[in-house]
Image (cartoon, rainbow, N blue to C red):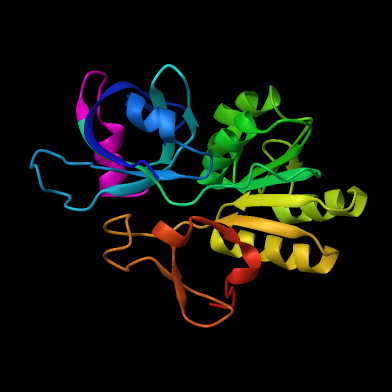
Amino acid sequence: MARYDLSAEIKKNEKLSDDVFLMTILAPEIARAARPGQFCMLSVNGNLRSDPLLRRPLSIFDSGDSGDISFLYKVTGRGTDILSQKKEGDSLDIIGPLGRGFRLDHSGPRILAGGGMGVAPLHFLAKRLEGAFSVILGAKTKGEILPVVKTFEASAERLLITTEDGSLGEKGLVTAMLEKELCLSKKNVLIHTCGPWPMMRAVHDLTVKFGTRCEASLEAGMACGIGACLGCAVKKTSGGYLHVCKDGPVTDSTEIDWEI
């Protein structure tokens, strides 16, 4: 699998809401090789070249023939705050594409269920899928997902929105809406999910209840992104551990021990 380590130019770093940004980088080699569900490691150096030392893993939000690759991210700490201050024309070091992506060869119906910044890899997947599929997007407030809702409207057959405070769409949780959809769904539905761990655990529980399959895109802190540091270990149901960077981030939800 092709993987690149290079310095790339930032084309845009748009502020979409109070703390959500969309960064677009010119990296044709990575853009051509990227598959939905994969991620990249981005340097977020401030004034000092080695501070912060560790790169940030970010899911690929979009990638196209233009050679651009984009990342949706939320400012949650010092590293992402530095990243949010990058300007057009700046350059940064990037490694990618990394990890295992979503299945594209499933012939039955699909539901994409994302929460918070977990909508990022699902956006790339939605652009690459052929045929009809449903999308459920959830967040705490409309500010987290409103900027990306329109980008899903063009690809999804059904787009359902839910927010915990009721500021956009139906008030409630992604899993409540997903359970309603599964009651109406045909057999052989495949669910793709990404978001906070408790949400994905609840999604997995629903797939067990309804006898469907689920691919979960895991989020984890990591130092290297290539399986060297072993810092992103997740316990498996079969014993031992998988590593999100090289065994995931997308994995069958039945492989994960969700009781942690």
- Relative image position of residue 5 (x, y in whole percent): 24, 40
Name above or below for residue 66 compared with residue 139: above
Q: Nearer the viewer, residue 80 or 119?
A: 119
Give residue 49's quadrant in the image.
top left
Q: Is residue 63 magenta?
A: no
Q: Quadrant of residue 214?
A: bottom right
Location of residue 145 (image quadrant): top right
Image position of 225 with respect to 26: above or below:
below
- Give the farthest residue toward the front: 1
> Horizontally, is 209 left or right of 60 in the view?
right
Whole-percent x and y of residue 211?
83, 65
Report the magenta residues as a range. 76-91
Which residue lies at the image location 80% right of the left edge and 50% below the top edge?
Answer: 189
For the residue pair 170 and 223, the one nearer the viewer reads as 223
Residue at image x 46%, y 61%?
A: 247
Question: Residue 86: percent from the left, percent from the top?
Answer: 25, 29
* Horizontal side, residue 249 vs residue 5: left or right: right
Q: Is residue 70 visible?
A: no
Please give the count of numbered marks on the rendered protein.
Answer: 0
- Would you say 72 lies left or right of 26 here? right
Residue at coordinates 54% horizontally, 47% vertically from top-left?
118
Q: Position of residue 226 (x, y in %)?
A: 32, 56
